[in-house]
Image (cartoon, grey):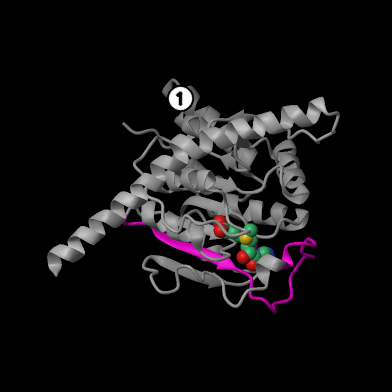
Amino acid sequence: MTAFLFRSHQQSVIAKRWSGIYALAVYHPVATLGRSLRTRSRTLRGRYERPTLLPQVDWSEIFPRHKILLTETDRRNGNVSIGELAILAQAAAGAPAGSELIEIGTFDGRTAMNLELNAPRSCSIFTLDLPQHQPTQFKLMDGERQYVDKPSPGSRFKRRQHRITQLIGDSATFDWSSHYGKAGLVFVDASHAYDYVRLDSATALKLAAPNGVVLWHDYGVWNGVTRALEDLERAEKTGLRHIRGTSLVVFTPSELHVPRAEDEWRHQIEWSSSRRLRASGRIDQHVIAVEPSR
Ligand SMILES: C[S@@+](CC[C@H](N)C(=O)[O-])C[C@H]1O[C@@H](n2cnc3c(N)ncnc32)[C@H](O)[C@@H]1O
């Protein structure tokens, strides 16, 4: 019996590992090529498509490669693609030990489950969703009610959740203060309305730890998301980048990794961090965190 259970556990791990390999080595490159061919074909046919403005980057330039596992790979309308899921899993695998991983917009819990599967064991996962009948702070977009109107959020992980804490509320009015500065990864994927994306983005930047990463979904897909992220970048010069072949946008505190002569480096970091982060209220955490190691 024990041997049988061990073997079926091993098989399940192998299947999850293969899903991770397939997503990054097959699905993602094909999807990237498909996107670029589609755009070219539309241009040739004279169909105007508003170009996205954020600079593009390959996921592998941002996240070190880890051996990831993927579960619940079947995709429902509202889920990220399997390629995007794999990139989120890479981001989770690289999250600092002991940090929080926070998702805004649970839906059926597929992404939360995969964050949990790949994050270091000492990390905790939090995911927030809007209850069906709760009045909202801002108007939702037409067409997104279908994702809100469901019997309960996180239906995929209900029976098996371990390190996932489910939060319930409107992202605009939820009290996030106990999580500020603790997140190694924040994933913003709730309402696609412009006002929500601007506010959720400001929240995400406050939630992120000094070495934390923020990812957004649906850039170039929902107009509210696209405009909000481009306006955010125009206003705050946070260095947002669009991950090639996906609708993901990423914020990394990249200047923290640039080696400089110590004094000059320290001055630069403090200056740029305080300028860039004044609006997001993360100044203190950032300055404390960039003490050079001796
Ligand atoms: C596109 S789905 C999220 C998909 C999910 N992140 C995934 O990867 O499978 C958007 C989710 O955001 C939730 N949502 C919409 N507006 C929200 C709000 N104001 N506050 C919290 N959650 C919200 C919806 O109920 C829905 O479940």
Displayed quadrant of residue 145: bottom right
The residue at the point 30 percent across, 56 percent down is: 12
Given residues 272 and 25, the one toward you in this image is 25
* Image quadrant occupied by the N terminus: bottom left
Q: Does residue 56 appear in this view?
A: yes
Q: Position of residue 34 (x, y in %)?
A: 63, 34
Displayed quadrant of residue 129: bottom right
* Image quadrant occupied by the C terminus: top left
Q: Counting other residues with Cα less than 10 Å from the Cα at mark 1, is it few (<14), some (14-19), or many (20 or more)?
A: few
Q: Is label 1's Cβ within 8 Å of ligand 1?
A: no
Q: Is residue 129 magenta?
A: yes
- Residue 31 placement, left or right of 66: right
The residue at the point 74 percent across, 76 percent down is: 135
Chain part drawn in magenta: 121-145
Q: Position of residue 230 (x, y in %)?
A: 73, 40
Above or below residue 291? Residue 138 is: below
Inspect the image, locate mark 1, and give the three-letter code of the amino acid beneath it.
Asp
Q: Is residue 19 magenta?
A: no
Given residues 195 and 117, the one toward you in this image is 117
Dominant secondary structure (helix, strand or loop) of the stretch shown in magenta: loop
Q: Which residue is mark 1?
A: 263
Above or below residue 1? Residue 61 is: above
Above or below residue 75? Residue 260 is: above
Given residues 14 and 275, the one toward you in this image is 14
Displayed quadrant of residue 196: bottom right
Q: Position of residue 45 (x, y in %)?
A: 83, 29
The residue at the point 73 percent across, 63 percent down is: 144
Label 1: state its secondary structure: helix
Above or below residue 217? Residue 47 is: above
The residue at the point 70 percent across, 44 percent down is: 229
| Quadrant containing ligand 1 | bottom right
